Image: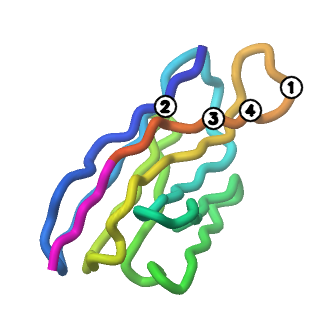
Amino acid sequence: QVRLVESGGGSVQFGDSLRLSCVASGDIISIYRMAWYRKPPGKQREVVARLDHDGSTSYPNSVKGRFTISLDNARKTGYLQMASLKPEDTAVYYCNIELYTAGGSWPEDYWGPGTQVTVSS
């Protein structure tokens, strides 16, 4: 059974930084790809960072230059470093990981339960 748990969320001020973590546990061989999503209040969920298996990353314009996604595959932990936070970054943040499990032939997709980030002006 694979489980993802995010941490690092909280309430911060405009311009502050936060680092979110996503720890994957279970019978995991390796992480293939990961992404961070967020769901602002009253809005749909949106992707804020992607990290592909080749190390390439992508970000929407709304966070480009402020957010950085990274992965420590040995620790089965992904990160989202967020800087220069704005009130519009307020949302529940979710990690999404595709990973190989023992006995699996292709990557399996998992989601964490989310962590709240609130940015006040």
Q: Which callout, 4 or 2, points at the residue further toward the start of the chain?
A: 2
In the rendered image, the quadrant that contains the C terminus is bottom left
Secondary structure at numbered mark 3: strand
The picture places residue 93, in percent across and down from the top left corner, at 42, 53
The residue labelled by disc 2 is 4
The residue labelled by disc 4 is 108
**Mark 4 in CB contact with mark 2 (< 8 angstroms):** no
Checking the image for residue 5, the label placed there is none
**Mark 4 in CB contact with mark 3 (< 8 angstroms):** yes
Nearer the observer: mark 3 or 1; the answer is: 3
Q: Residue at x 22, y 69 (%)?
A: 119
Distance between the Cα atoms at labels 4 and 1? 9 Å
Secondary structure at numbered mark 2: strand
Checking the image for residue 110, the label placed there is 3
The picture places residue 92, in percent across and down from the top left corner, at 40, 53
Distance between the Cα atoms at labels 3 and 2? 7 Å
Residue situated in front as seen by the camera: 26 or 89: 89
Residue situated in front as seen by the camera: 110 or 29: 110
Highlighted range, magenta: 116-121
Secondary structure at numbered mark 4: strand
Dot 1 crowding, Cα within 10 Å, few <14, some 14–19, many 20+ = few
Residue at the far right: name it: 105
Q: Amino acid at mark 2?
A: Leu
Q: Which callout, 3 or 2, points at the residue further toward the start of the chain?
A: 2
Q: Amino acid at mark 4?
A: Glu
